[in-house]
Image: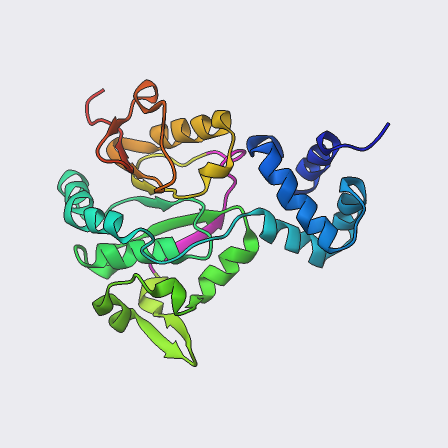
Amino acid sequence: MAYEYEEFKKDIHLLTNIDLNAYKEQQMKRRITSLYTKHSFKGFQDYVAALKKDKALYEEFLNYFTINVSEFYRNPEQWKLMDSDVIPLLISRFGENLKIWSAACSTGDEPYSLVMALSRHIPLNKINIYATDIDKQVIEKAKTGLYSAKSIVSVPDDLKKKYFTDVGGAFQISDEIKSRVRFAEHNLILNNFQKDFNFIVCRNVLIYFTEEAKEEVFEKFFYSLKPGGILFIGSTEQISSYKEIGYTRKSSFYYERPEKQ
């Protein structure tokens, strides 16, 4: 019997604890086929056998598989709405000690953007962001805090000047911003979610998930929010079943768990 993609998914789950069933199949098969072809493997079976033996290949797979496209203040107009409306609303409801989660945080651009955005409203020493990603390598990169000029192009000029240092054409974010973020590994499909968040940010990741997996994650986010808490999603995403889950829609990309239920 030929070794097929279904067997590959089972082996990858055993090897990495990543459930490929949660991802759109054709899209993911193309990505993985492109990757193993680059290394001259003949198919999924040869490739997974190599992943089990070669640490560098395994880490490359994880890094390639977890789609890490990120930038500071991505879609700036949505961050302006956060600054003018969302953060003041959250502070009025919950005070300054907000519990915030940046889920699927990639290379740290998003949680560090959150710290800077909050710093306009709250003293830095009161800001604490919990930031998670499935990929250990990008978490390590995030902790380093070194970014290209392109990735910080949308950062407001005053914050860029205040919190970044040019180090030979790359830009190092300040330790005072880095110290406000706590990073951890987390799998949105398999792991439990913490509770009582005031604000959750998860953007431009779930577009790669199946509809069933997306709905499951959005529902888990709902119950991770405190009543009155808000979820911020990406510009390419929508929660089609938001009413059924229980959210109210504050704007195109902000969804609220109602205060009274």
Residue visible at 56% across and 57% down? 137
**Residue 182 is one of the magenta-drawn residues:** yes
Give x and y (percent) for residue 29.
65, 39
Determine if the magenta segment contains residue 168: no
The colour style of the image is rainbow
Which quarter of the rendering shows the N terminus? top right
Residue 71 horizontal/vertical position (percent): 39, 57
Q: Which residue is drawn at 36% across and 32% down?
A: 238
Judge from the rendering whether residue 59 lies leftward or rightward of residue 174; answer left or right.
Answer: right
Q: Position of residue 30 (x, y in %)?
A: 64, 42
Query: In the current view of this chain or complex, which residue is farthest to the bottom?
Result: 168
Q: Which residue is depicted at the point 72% across and 49% down?
A: 36
Residue 19 is at least partly visible in this image: no
Q: Is residue 6 left or right of residue 134?
A: right
Quarter holding the C terminus is: top left
Looking at the image, is 67 positioned above or below residue 150? above
Q: In this view, does 254 lie above or below 154?
A: above
User: Does the rendering let one see residue 4?
Assistant: yes
Horizontal side of residue 23 vs 79, given as left or right: right
Q: What stretch is highlighted in magenta?
A: 180-192
Q: Is the magenta stretch mostly helix, strand or loop?
A: loop
Question: What x and y, as percent, mark residue 25?
Answer: 61, 33
Residue at screen point 50% across, 62% down: 141
Residue 112: name its quadrant: bottom left
